[in-house]
Image (spheres, grey):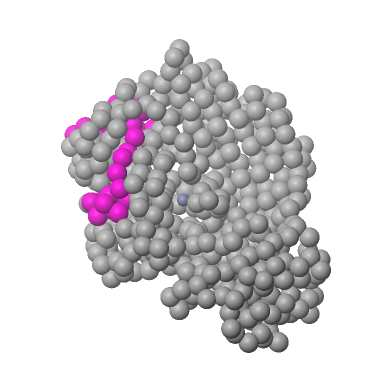
């Protein structure tokens, strides 16, 4: 990247009208996407995106200017533009002592992306496609995709921060439709993480697509879901998307400082049962939401949000942390150099609880088991949600019985959290293809053990719900 003297010059230029803190963010992204739709290779696109931005904080606000030209001249122009907005009375600083931060976590890659040719990657998609179609003649549509992303980021600021991160993301996705007469069932599955091609050796995409195809066919026989208030047991793993969307966003500091969140001012208060602990952990090796440093150069951290039912901490970026004169928790993330960072989740999960997952079902007289959640709509920050259950089963006398379709879960996140009466010991994280939307998109991971909510509203409508988060 640019020599240290250039960075110094850009930072000094950014601070020339005063300003409290100046930051330089540089990014270099390379992406390859292959899409196989209806057995034809639709697209094979390779693209790179390079750019950087300069941000100047002054008081409670910040100005940001970005460019897709990483020359010193272009970044100096961006620094001028950001500085123009500064109205601070601070003295301009002349020298910044940049100290390179050494990451305390790593996400090592064993097999770089170039160890397979594009033709071999396309052949893998064909194999996934054929495996899905061979599962049943009722599979009427199948689309698969392969995406690899390599992104390097460099972050410098006038507090002396110099941090670099390198993120290799691999993602395989399959979306299929089972059809019989008028009955249709769509299921999306996939595998992903911050990993190289070794993921393909460690996890089997063929098994995943076969299971998805079998489930879609199986669900064609499902009965319409009952509606009303009932006990709902939510499956482990991807089921954690409900916590992420309906509770996690309420713990992002921007919703807290603006007062928009139900959790504002609630640190130290009880927000769930005493066996509930929830965590946002950006340090888990090779997970989709993991980082070495966030997009503001703060080291990734494990943040305990809720411990034994008590709200402990929110998720902070620099902007919100500076408002309160505290430290960031390493949750400052941005979609790209074209965006200002904001508080975002990384890998967010409800921790393992005390209950035997089989006992959770066994002890439920009557209810719904939400095995696979689909898309959801959430008023993030407030936590009102509607989630589709793509694979659901009735629970009758402690056993899973009839598959049901069209169920939706309707509620308010913080309220649902308070109601939880059992949490299993079977913590699992999701398969690693989750995308979070909050104005900007961010790759995240979610997880949870089996969780029971004694009373939740189940809507029986069959309306499609457009997702904030794909899965
Ligand atoms: Zn989200």
Above or below 169: residue 154: below
**Residue 453, visible in the rendered structure:** yes
Residue at image location 25% in from the left, 38% down from the top:
457
Quarter where residue 286 is shown:
bottom right
Residue at image location 71% in from the left, 48% down from the top:
31
Residue 240 is left or right of residue 338, and the answer is left
Tell me where residue 287 appears, x and y as whole percent: 54, 56
Q: Nearer the viewer, residue 395 or 267?
A: 267
Tell me where residue 222 appears, x and y as whole percent: 35, 23
Above or below 27: residue 326: below
Above or below 371: residue 95: below
Magenta segment, principal secondary structure? strand
Q: Nearer the viewer, residue 86 or 436?
A: 86
Residue at image location 45% in from the left, 79% down from the top:
325
Most extreme residue toward the top, as rendered? 181
Residue at image location 69% in from the left, 41% down from the top:
33
The boundaries of the magenta stretch are 391-420
Q: Nearer the viewer, residue 159 or 407?
A: 159
Residue 218 inside the magenta-drawn segment: no
Q: Nearer the viewer, residue 215 or 184?
A: 184
Residue 267 is left or right of residue 296, and the answer is left
Residue 396 inside the magenta-drawn segment: yes
Quarter of the picture holding the N terminus: bottom right
Residue 444 is left or right of residue 406, and the answer is right
**Residue 21, visible in the rendered structure:** no
């Amino acid at each position: 990247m640019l020599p240290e003297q250039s960075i110094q010059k850009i930072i000094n230029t950014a601070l020339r009208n005063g300003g409290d803190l100046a930051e330089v963010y540089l990014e270099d992204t390379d992406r390859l996407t292959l899409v196989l739709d209806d057995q034809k290779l639709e697209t094979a696109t390779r693209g790179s995106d390079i750019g950087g931005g300069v941000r100047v904080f002054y008081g409670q606000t910040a100005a940001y200017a970005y460019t897709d030209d990483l020359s010193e001249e272009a970044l100096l122009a961006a620094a001028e533009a950001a500085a123009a907005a500064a109205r601070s009375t601070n003295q301009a600083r002349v020298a910044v002592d940049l100290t390179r931060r050494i990451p305390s976590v790593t996400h090592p890659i064993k097999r770089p992306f170039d160890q397979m040719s594009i033709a071999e990657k396309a052949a893998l998609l064909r194999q996934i496609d054929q495996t899905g179609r061979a599962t049943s003649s009722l599979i009427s549509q199948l689309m698969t995709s392969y995406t690899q992303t390599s992104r390097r980021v460099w972050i410098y600021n006038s507090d002396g921060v110099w941090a670099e991160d390198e993120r290799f993301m691999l993602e395989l996705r399959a979306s299929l439709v089972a059809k019989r007469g008028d009955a249709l069932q769509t299921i999306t599955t996939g595998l992903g993480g911050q990993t190289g091609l070794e993921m393909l050796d460690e996890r089997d995409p063929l098994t995943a697509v076969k299971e998805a195809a079998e489930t879609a066919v199986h669900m064609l026989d499902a009965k319409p879901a009952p509606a009303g208030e009932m006990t709902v047991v939510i499956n482990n793993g991807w089921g954690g998307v409900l916590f992420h969307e309906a509770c996690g966003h309420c713990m992002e500091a921007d919703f807290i400082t603006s007062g928009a969140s139900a959790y504002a001012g609630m640190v130290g208060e009880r927000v769930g049962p005493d066996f509930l602990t929830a965590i946002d952990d950006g340090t888990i090796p090779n997970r989709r939401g993991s980082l070495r440093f966030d997009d503001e150069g703060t080291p990734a951290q494990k943040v305990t949000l809720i411990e034994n039912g008590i709200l402990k901490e929110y998720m902070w970026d620099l902007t919100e942390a500076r408002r309160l004169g505290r430290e960031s928790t390493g949750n400052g993330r941005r979609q790209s150099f074209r965006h200002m960072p904001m508080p975002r989740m990384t890998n967010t999960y409800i921790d393992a609880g005390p209950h035997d997952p089989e006992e959770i079902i066994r002890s439920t007289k009557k209810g719904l088991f939400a095995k696979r959640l689909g898309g959801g709509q959430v008023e993030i920050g407030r936590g009102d949600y509607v989630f589709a259950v793509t694979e659901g089963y009735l629970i009758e006398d402690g056993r899973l019985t009839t598959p049901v379709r069209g169920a939706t879960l309707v509620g308010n996140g913080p309220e649902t959290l308070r109601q939880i009466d059992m949490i299993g010991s079977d913590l699992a994280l999701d398969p690693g293809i989750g995308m979070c939307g909050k104005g900007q998109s961010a790759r995240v991971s979610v997880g949870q053990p089996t969780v029971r909510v004694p009373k939740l509203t189940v809507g029986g409508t069959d309306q499609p719900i457009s997702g904030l988060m794909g899965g």
